[in-house]
Image (spheres, grey):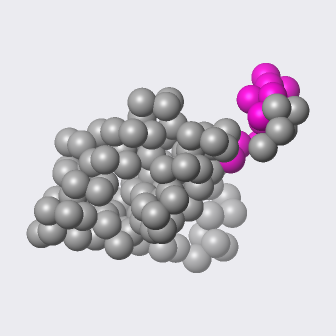
């Protein structure tokens, strides 16, 4: 990547953020956050969904989190499907999560008059 592109992506005037998806899949994954100006990485759900019963999945999730956090990069865990998984993700320092443990998917038309995800969760709880 050229120095010009790096400086544009990290400029105060930049309107876009850059993230990497499915982090951990493929042997060259650690190359990308070190050499590309990403703001976050999404930890692949194949690791996350098994962190409670597979030591290797837990170790991979911890390693990814530790390494990218040292670079100032946020982490997003895919497949956070339960409260127990969310608790483990918090414990190891993952910053964000997505999956049924956070919220079930909803039709987009239900989000048209909602200003924030928190407001949407409150409305859904009131309807239940």
**Dominant secondary-structure state across the stretch colored magenta:** loop
Q: Residue at x 23, y 70 (%)?
A: 50
Q: In the depicted view, which residue is nearer to us: 62 or 117? A: 62
Question: Residue 6's x, y, as percent?
Answer: 77, 34
Q: In the depicted view, which residue is nearer to us: 83 or 93? A: 93
Most distant residue in the top direction: 12
Q: Is residue 58 left or right of residue 44?
A: left
Q: Residue at x 59, y 50 (%)?
A: 32
Magenta run includes residue 32:
no
Q: Tell me if residue 84 comes above or below residue 91 in the rendering.
A: below
Q: Is residue 97 left or right of residue 86?
A: right
Q: Residue at x 56, y 40 (%)?
A: 34
Q: Quadrant of residue 4?
A: top right
Question: Residue 22's x, y, as percent?
Answer: 50, 65
Residue stretch rendered in magenta on the structure:
6-18
Q: Quadrant of residue 112?
A: bottom right
Residue 102 visible from this viewpoint: yes
Question: Residue 70's x, y, as percent?
Answer: 42, 30
Q: In the depicted view, which residue is nearer to us: 119 or 64? A: 64
Magenta run includes residue 10:
yes
Q: Residue at x 48, y 50 (%)?
A: 30
Q: Quadrant of residue 77?
A: bottom left
**On-image quarter of the N terminus:** top right
Residue 14 visible from this viewpoint: no
**On-image quarter of the C terminus:** bottom left
- Total label count? 0
Question: Residue 3's x, y, as percent?
Answer: 82, 32
């Amino acid at each position: 990547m050229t120095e010009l592109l790096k400086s544009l992506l990290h400029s105060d005037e930049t309107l876009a953020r850059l993230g990497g998806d499915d982090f951990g899949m493929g042997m060259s994954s650690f190359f990308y956050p070190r050499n590309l100006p990403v703001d976050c990485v999404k930890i692949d759900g194949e690791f996350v969904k098994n962190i409670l019963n597979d030591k290797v999945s837990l170790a991979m999730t911890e390693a990814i989190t530790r390494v990218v956090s040292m670079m100032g990069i946020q982490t997003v865990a895919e497949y956070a499907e339960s409260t127990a998984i969310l608790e483990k993700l918090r414990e190891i320092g993952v910053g964000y999560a997505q999956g049924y443990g956070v919220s079930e998917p909803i039709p987009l038309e239900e989000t048209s008059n909602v200003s924030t995800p928190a407001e949407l969760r409150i409305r859904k709880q009131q309807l239940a």
